[in-house]
């Protein structure tokens, strides 16, 4: 990660130490365990600038990896629907989802 500590702390403060994808509060996590995700990943030309960096928990950052946000969203929807299908099989009546909104889309500042 080519972001220095002060820049990282600025971004974490901007994002209220909340994972901008799942909404997990990271305030009590060790600094090294809080990730900064390149919203537009580096392999797609995304830069290590504040505007392109989002506070992220380790789990979300590793799951998103180099995917673009729509690709990742679709992957998550499919995973959730697989579980719903499993529950449906056992008679639990839950409808499949057609959309998923990330934390920053509901509450984020960017
Ligand atoms: Zn997260």
Image (cartoon, rainbow, N blue to C red):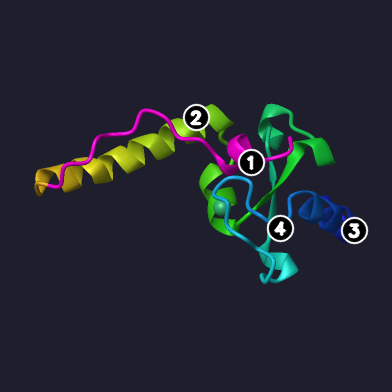
Q: Check residue 17 in the rendering and tell me which mark sits there, or answer none.
A: 4
Q: Check residue 71 in the rendering and tell me which mark sits there, or answer none.
A: 2
Per the model, the C-alpha gap separating discs 2 and 4 is 25 Å
Q: Earlier in the sequence, mark 2 or mark 4?
A: 4
Q: Check residue 90 in the rendering and tell me which mark sits there, or answer none.
A: none
110 on left or right of 49? left
Q: Find numbered disc 4 in the image and state the secondary structure of the residue it sits on.
A: loop
User: Residue 76, image x and y in percent?
Assistant: 42, 39
Q: Earlier in the sequence, mark 3 or mark 2?
A: 3
Q: Specify whether residue 102 is painted magenta.
A: yes
Q: Earlier in the sequence, mark 3 or mark 1?
A: 3
Q: Which residues are magenta?
A: 92-110
Per the model, the C-alpha gap separating discs 3 and 1 is 24 Å
Per the model, the C-alpha gap separating discs 1 and 4 is 13 Å
Q: Quadrant of the C terminus?
A: top right
Disc 3: which residue: 6
Q: Earlier in the sequence, mark 1 or mark 4?
A: 4
Residue at 86% across, 60% down: 5
Q: Specify whether residue 106 is painted magenta.
A: yes
Choose mark 1 or mark 4, whichever is in front.
1
Per the model, the C-alpha gap separating discs 2 and 1 is 21 Å
Name the foreground residue: 38 vs 80.
Answer: 80
Q: Check residue 107 in the rendering and tell me which mark sits there, or answer none.
A: 1
Q: Earlier in the sequence, mark 3 or mark 4?
A: 3
């Amino acid at each position: 990660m080519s972001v220095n500590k002060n820049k990282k702390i600025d971004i974490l403060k901007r994002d209220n130490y909340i994972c901008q994808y799942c909404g997990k509060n990271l305030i009590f996590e060790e600094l090294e365990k809080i990730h900064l995700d390149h919203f537009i990943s580096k392999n797609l030309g995304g830069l290590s600038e504040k505007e392109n960096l989002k506070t992220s928990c380790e789990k979300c950052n590793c799951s998103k990896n180099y995917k673009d946000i729509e690709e990742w969203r679709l992957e998550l929807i499919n995973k959730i629907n697989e579980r719903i299908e499993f529950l449906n099989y056992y008679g639990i009546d839950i409808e499949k989802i057609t959309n998923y909104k990330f934390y920053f889309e509901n509450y984020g500042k960017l």
